[in-house]
Image (cartoon, helix red, strand yellow):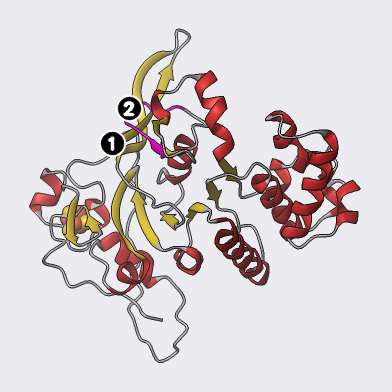
Amino acid sequence: NHLKKYFPIEKGFLRRVVGHVRAVDDVSLYIHEGEAFGLVGESGSGKTTLGRCIVRAISPSEGEIWFRLPDGRRVNLAQMDRRELRAVRRYMHMIFQDPYSSLNPRMTVRDIIAEPLRYNHLGTEQEINERVKELIQLVGLEVQHLKRYPHAFSGGQRQRIGIARSLAINPRLIVCDEAVSALDVSIQAQILNLLLDLQEQFKLTYLFIAHDLSVVKHISHRIGVMYVGKLVEMAETHELFTNPRHPYTEALLSAVPKTDPDLKTERIILAGEVANPANPPSGCYFHPRCRYARDICREETPSWDEVSPGHFVSCHLARELNLQGTTG
Ligand code: SF4
């Protein structure tokens, strides 16, 4: 709810604060229990910072993060201190883009997967060993792999190990940050399918962060689009693809490869650079690159409106423009 994360820009010996990078700038969204929510945008759009705020890997500057615990209580993670967070952190986990750098190269796979169980004191050593064996098989690897080290595995296998580790403590929410971006396309599909299977089996909730809309489409029930720290559009996946209401979403969609070769859509090339989050433009942050921009776009910040049930957009012309979607 109205989440902000501003990083100070410091200058000189005395580290005087001369400005702020608005990495996340007043973002409000909801994720239903058991759904996969995709978050897309170019690099630097703030999606990773938003994901890290949501699991409280970093503290937001302002705003609320409401999270429902398994016992039904709703807690505001943004207000919690370190001790309170420790008690709820086991219900959320983050999977990163580079599985190699997120797995300790000096630990065996057994210890990597067991670590969150030990940290949270979840069982005796024997119970933890049994659980680790169960987890490694759940992600399609074998028990013999447990005594090996991360360097002995391919990128896809390492991501499977990361997923096994994330499942160890029965989380409710898993934030996948570009979790398949570094993998070959065929391996990407295997990992996405594994995530989908696990979601069904364990009723997991995903926040799936990626720059590639086609990857997000495969896994997400709903999608949010970010631009320079702001959420500019949010809708159910099919609705967003077929009926985009924000010109930035339209441009992203035009770059998605089509499965139907007869489908002719214009590829929209965005002019100019992504705006600087330390010094964003006036009005709508997207206006210097928007082919539909009018005077009002340069002068006034667009509001966040629900243009049809569950479809939210931040654009002055959202109800006027007839934008090009895709079905392919
Ligand atoms: Fe483009 Fe104006 Fe909409 Fe911004 S508010 S996306 S500049 S049409």
Closest to the observer, 211 or 63? 63
Disc 1 under 8 Å from ligand 1? The reply is no
Residue 191 placed where, x, y %?
Answer: 64, 63
Q: Magenta stretch mostly in which secondary structure?
A: loop
Residue 164 placed where, x, y %?
Answer: 70, 50
Marks 1 & 2, CB-CB < 8 Å contact: yes
Of the numbered discs 1 and 2, the one sitting upstream in the chain is 1
Q: Quadrant of the C terminus?
A: bottom left
Instruction: Name the residue tied to disc 2.
Output: 62
Q: Quadrant of the N terminus?
A: top left
Q: Is residue 111 left or right of residue 89?
A: right
Q: Quadrant of residue 187?
A: bottom right
Instruction: Name the residue tied to disc 1.
Output: 2
Measured in 3D between alpha carbons, the distance from the residue under mark 1 to the one under mark 2, in whole angstroms, is 7 Å
Is 228 rendered above or below residue 256? Answer: above
Is 281 rendered above or below residue 190? Answer: above
Tell me the number on the disc at residue 129. none
Q: Is residue 215 left or right of residue 5?
A: right
The magenta stretch spans residue 65: yes
Q: Which residues are magenta?
A: 59-67
Q: Is residue 308 left or right of residue 218?
A: left
